[in-house]
Amino acid sequence: MDEGNTFLNALVGAVVTAVSASFIPFSPVLGGALAGYFQGGTRSDGLKVGAISGAIALVPVVAVLFLVLSFLGFVSVGSGEGVFPFAIGGVIVVFVFVALAVYTVGLSALGGWIGNYVKYDTDVDL
């Protein structure tokens, strides 16, 4: 990879996160670690590229979650009964989106730091 090309390294990490998310627990750490390893530089550079990687990986996840929650809301309103009052449903949706963002971006940033650590302070060579 191109050491120092932040966008390319973050994109590689985001693709790894998105592909491995369905079968590897805590996959944002793996994607962020690859991005941080490829980025090089200082620990803060690894942290930054990991966070960017997580933000990029968050886009398709949020889009799918938005479609699923929209469908559930449509079905709920269409039933006439309304499973949740709108205020409670809105709070739950906001909480889910914030928790997902913290999980994905936070773990990717941690992975970026770990990837940078592995590159400079261990004997592991990818």
Image (cartoon, rainbow, N blue to C red):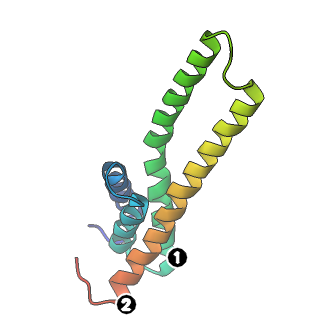
Calculate the distance from the C-alpha at mark 1 to the C-alpha at mark 2.
Answer: 15 Å
Q: Nearer the viewer, residue 116 or 1?
A: 116
- Position of 72 compared to 46: left or right? right
> Residue at the right extreme?
87
Q: Amino acid at mark 2?
A: Asp
Residue at 33% of width from left, 71% of height from top?
A: 38
What secondary structure is marked by label 2? helix
Dot 1: few (<14), some (14–19), or many (≥20) neighbours within 10 Å?
A: some
| Spot occupied by residue 8 in the image (x, y as percentages of width and height) | 35, 58
| Spot occupied by residue 54 in the image (x, y as percentages of width and height) | 47, 56
> Residue at the left extreme?
126
The residue tagged 1 is 44
Residue at 41% of width from left, 83% of height from top?
A: 117
| Spot occupied by residue 39 in the image (x, y as percentages of width and height) | 37, 71
Q: Nearer the viewer, residue 107 or 109?
A: 107
Residue at 48% of width from left, 58% of height from top?
A: 52
As drawn, the label of residue 121 is 2
What secondary structure is marked by label 1? helix
Task: Indicate the quadrant containing the N terminus: top left, top right, bottom left or bottom right.
Answer: bottom left
